Image (cartoon, grey):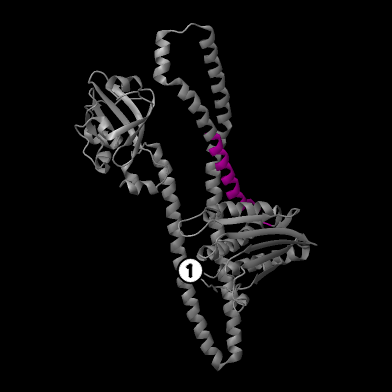
Amino acid sequence: MIVPTFSLAPELFARSFPFHIIFDCECKILQVGEVLLRIHPENLIGCNLSQHFKIIRPAIKGAPDFATISKQSRSLFLLESLHNGIQLKGQMIPDQEQSVIFFLCSVWVTETNALAKFGLKLKDFAIHDPIIDFLFLLQGQNTALEDTKKLTIELTQKQEQLQQALTIQEVLAQTAEAQAQKLEQCLLELQRTQSQLIQTEKMSSLGQLVAGIAHEINNPVNFIQGNVNYIEEYTQSLLNLLSLYQKYFPSHPEIEEFTEELDLEYIIQDLFKILSSMKLGAIRIRDIVLSLRTFSRLDEAEMKTVDIHEGIDSTLLILSHKFEKKFNFSRIEIIKDYGNLPLVECYASELNQVFLNILTNAIDILQNNRTLDLAKIIIKTCLDCNLVCVSIKDNGIGIDEKLQDKVFDPFFTTKPVGQGTGLGLSICYQIVVDKHHGQLNCISKPGQGAEFIIKIPLCQSRQAREVDSVQKVLG
């Protein structure tokens, strides 16, 4: 590592280390990074380091001084501001010739929400700072959510345009009933075609994006997971060797001093905790990647036999963030009652979309019901003769009997304008009934929740597959 000198150009030094602190042999602060100087509530220049910061790690007995900090320079330092609680994590680099110490550090945060509290933005971090990669990933997630909101607004506008067309159609129906019926049929076909185009385009784009991200994440995760076991094994071997040296060879004062300086006992304890956290994190990322690939199933665009339970579990994992307790509603409990199902012949990615749409509607209903003490979604599967049955039931407010006949109509929604497109259940109906030759029913009573029951054949008949092939050829 190249140690920067105190005479380095200020603008270059500030850009490379925007949170740095430089103090002299009396621990008096001489210079502070421009970003840290801006966000800290108290003036730092000319003050003693201990007036504004507490050294959390490494453990230093008594008041910290130049010699003590220099001895611990190989350790990782963690400082906490006494004024606003901000934590700085980095390395102390002493310069004996100039009698100064450079503390090259970064703000230690684990989520983008923490930045606003300190008046920070992503551009304030140095481009080489490893924390910035993590924060940009979170920012990318927020950008994707904003894009989804924009798409919802566009679909709402199209819904209003189609509603206007329906109004015109109703006026024409008063003058010519036969012509109106024909127009209504054409409009219904147009809506189905439009919803199919929207669904196909959305799932294709989403599937390609998910599969691409999953592939890019999978490679480094496999590398990390494959090597962390070797690191743990090698580390244990080296520690065993060190233990043997300590046992059979006499201690030397210089070795004892260096051991105390390194805080060897803490390093040994913390090392295996770090390795365990790395293994757990790699496994969790791997499971998420597998669930994303299972949900997208780009390699299973054609009909084939799959495990229905894997599709449901991958969908639940994608929606897991919506089940957690938030400030204005309670946590949603998921109860799974899976039966013993064989592999099912189906269009896997489209069936996953059915699960996603129905579960999303159930979550929205439960979150809008503030009177529930315990929100629940019960998922049950079973085999009825040659039909695979999947039941998704919630304990929400239910659906009015007058509206139950309309829930599968294109563009019908009970949600406020801007919060629903009316395409979700219509698309589910097309996928289950038209593509899988099955049944999709809604059973509900006001105040007793709603239950959606999906039934599809265990094996699609040869005739049904031939009909699907002909429809694909005809466009």
Q: Residue furthest bottom?
A: 175
Residue depicted at 62% across the width and 69% down the height: 448
Q: Residue furthest left?
A: 46
On screen, residue 463 versus residue 329, left or right, reads right
**What kind of element bears circle 1?**
helix
Q: Of residues 272 and 464, which is closer to you in this image?
A: 272
**Kind of residue sitting beneath label 1:** Leu
- The image position of residue 268, as x and y in percent, is 49, 23
Q: Quadrant of residue 125?
A: top left
Q: Which residues are magenta?
A: 278-302
- The image position of residue 142, as x and y in percent, is 43, 53
Residue depicted at 38% across the width and 22% down the height: 74
Give the crowd class for mark 1: few <14, some 14-19, many >=20 residues within 10 Å. some
- The image position of residue 456, as x and y in percent, is 72, 63
Q: Which residue is mark 1?
A: 155
Indicate whether residue 163 is drawn in magenta.
no
Secondary structure mostly seen in magenta is helix
Q: Of residues 47 and 174, which is closer to you in this image?
A: 47
Q: Of residues 331 and 230, which is closer to you in this image?
A: 331
- The image position of residue 30, as x and y in percent, is 21, 30
Q: Residue furthest right?
A: 385
Image quarter where the C terminus lies is: bottom right
Image quarter where the N terminus lies is: top left
Q: Quadrant of residue 110?
A: top left
Q: Is residue 305 above or below residue 403?
A: above
Query: Is residue 435 in view?
Result: no
Query: Is residue 472 in view?
Result: yes
On screen, residue 185 versus residue 386, left or right, reads left
Q: Quadrant of residue 190?
A: bottom right
Task: Say how many tags the image has.
Answer: 1
